[in-house]
Image (cartoon, helix red, strand yellow):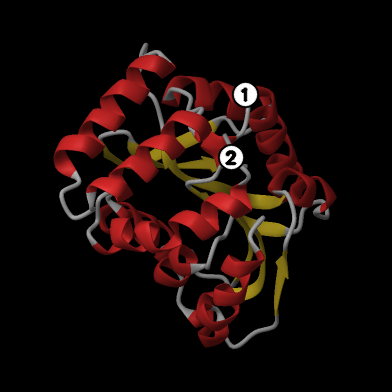
Amino acid sequence: MKTDPIYIFRKTWATYQKVISNNLMFHREILTAVKKLLESRQETLNILDLGCGDATHIGKILSPGQVAEYCGCDLSPYALDVAKNNLEPFGISVNLLCRDMVAVLREAPDNHFDVVYSGYALHHLSTDEKQIFFTECQRTLRENGCVILVDVMLEEEQARNAYLDCYNGAVATQWEALTAHERKQVQEHIRNCDFPETPADMQMLASNAGLTNCQRLEKQTWHEAWCYFA
């Protein structure tokens, strides 16, 4: 079965837009919480957006005046084409890279970014890759910088198979805004591509990297927003 991220993006782009517009993954509540945190920052920010997609998320949580520098990466050139237009209101030169997020993070300069943001991308990585993610984030963050993570997470002590059954059950019975075919697409994606961790395990990975101060910003079923401070 083909699970290439670019293929998945092209196949399910319209479906994902319906998921967002119908708030099926609680984007409104989660992005409101993240926006509130970032509004407390007074300085302009250097932003690294990993798995940025079309940059819709970052455009909803940051105002143009808050951004000094923006770098985003995604494996889909189609998403990045859309991102160019969505980032125009920032009024700055943006750097968009069609590359793997871990590779981009490893090449990021030391002590450079104020915020590393990732929305619904990290759960595609293995546990070892997630550890690399946090380690490299700590290296590239400035003093008082932070990692903002929006993602699906297991409930504490929940196994992946139980998560898959529960989440796909919710898609089948509650995501009525989607057609039966679209729900099947989503369920296929979840089965093949979701490898979430528990919040406690994510905190451990962050702590291993030196990000010992963390804060849950929002939780809606398996959809959570966390901030890990440098």
Question: Mark 1 Cα within 10 Å, few/some/many (few <14, many 20+)?
Answer: some
Question: Mark 2 Cα within 10 Å, few/some/many (few <14, many 20+)?
Answer: few
Foreground residue, 99 or 107? 99
Q: Is mark 2 on a helix, strand or loop?
A: loop
Screen quadrant of the C terminus: top right
Q: Label 2, on which residue?
A: 3
**Amino acid identity at mark 2:** Thr
Mark number displayed over residue 127: 1
Q: Quadrant of residue 69?
A: bottom right
The answer to whether any part of residue 143 appears in the image is yes
Q: Which residue is drawn at the image coordinates 15% and 36% (left, top)?
A: 173
The answer to whether any part of residue 217 appears in the image is no
Q: Where is residue 199 in the image (x, y as percent from the top left)?
A: 43, 26
Q: Quadrant of residue 226?
A: top left
Mark number displayed over residue 56: none
Screen quadrant of the N terminus: top right
Q: Is mark 1 on a helix, strand or loop?
A: helix
Q: Which residue is drawn at the image coordinates 67% and 28% (left, top)?
A: 131
Q: Where is residue 75 in the image (x, y as percent from the top left)?
A: 67, 55
Q: Which residue is drawn at the image coordinates 75% and 48% (left, top)?
A: 105
Q: Where is residue 90 in the image (x, y as percent from the top left)?
A: 55, 83
